[in-house]
Amino acid sequence: MLSRELDNVKLELTALALKVSLLSELARHEEARELADEVLERETSYKERAEDAAEMSVVQTQLADILWKGKQDKPTALKYLWRAISNDKWNQQAIDAIRYVRNGKSQRAKYFRVLLEGVWNELDDDIPNPGFIISYDVIADDAAEAMKFLKRFEPPPLRRSLIMRECEPLADWPDEPKGVYKTFPYHIFPRDNEEDGNHDN
């Protein structure tokens, strides 16, 4: 019975996200905003499963698009985009929108492939003392700015332990907005005690 109820919630949210998207594409911004607001009021109940969080991220991204294209409301648009990323950091539409709404460009910017390592914040019966690595593509002036952009994409419990293991410049990239371009999957691994000490410093 519970499974059927959850499936119904998933179906409802998917349909609403699609409707918000279609209204936005048709430039019916006010209708799209009202529907998105209605969905967002139920955000807590929809975030019970990862799939639902991903669908909520779509709605938040569409609402940000409405606020940006319809009203040029940059602060509120970014607020919803960061909420979208917190629900689904692999939402490519939200990733791209953050860069273009912020629109920070630099003649010194480079395209970097970055590898981060950190301490996983959830216990895993199969992996004692878990750590993680994750890769990103990011455009920034240097490694320090890249790290600044990337920290915002990680959940707060993971940020304190982050270490930049690699930051490889792949190309000069002065003509596109700076920020994160792509997020890759997490890889979880067992850490030893020496690594604990290194992360605590």
Image (tube, grey):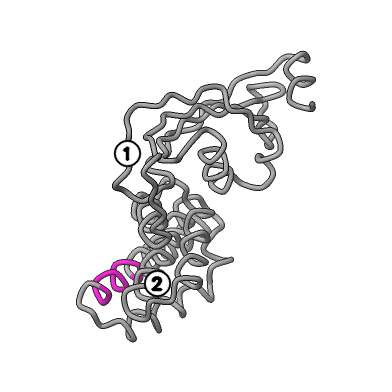
Q: Nearer the viewer, residue 166 or 17?
A: 166
- Residue 31 is inside the magenta segment: no
Which residue appears at 51% of the width and 38% of the height?
146
Figure quadrant of residue 102:
bottom left
| Horizontal relation, residue 98 to residue 86: left or right | left
What's the magenta region?
Answer: 16-24
Q: Nearer the viewer, residue 125 or 161?
A: 161
Instruction: Check disc 1 and report the residue beneath it.
Output: 173
Which residue appears at 58% of the width and 66% of the height?
44
| Horizontal relation, residue 80 to residue 193: left or right | left
Say above or below: 36 vs 58: below
Q: Residue 68: x percent and y percent?
A: 37, 72
Instruction: Check disc 2 and report the residue beneath it.
Output: 63
Figure quadrant of residue 86:
bottom right
> Amino acid under label 1?
Trp
Mark 1 residue element: loop
Give the label, 2 or 1, closer to the camera.
1
Q: Nearer the viewer, residue 68 or 29?
A: 68
Q: Residue 64: x percent and y percent?
A: 41, 69
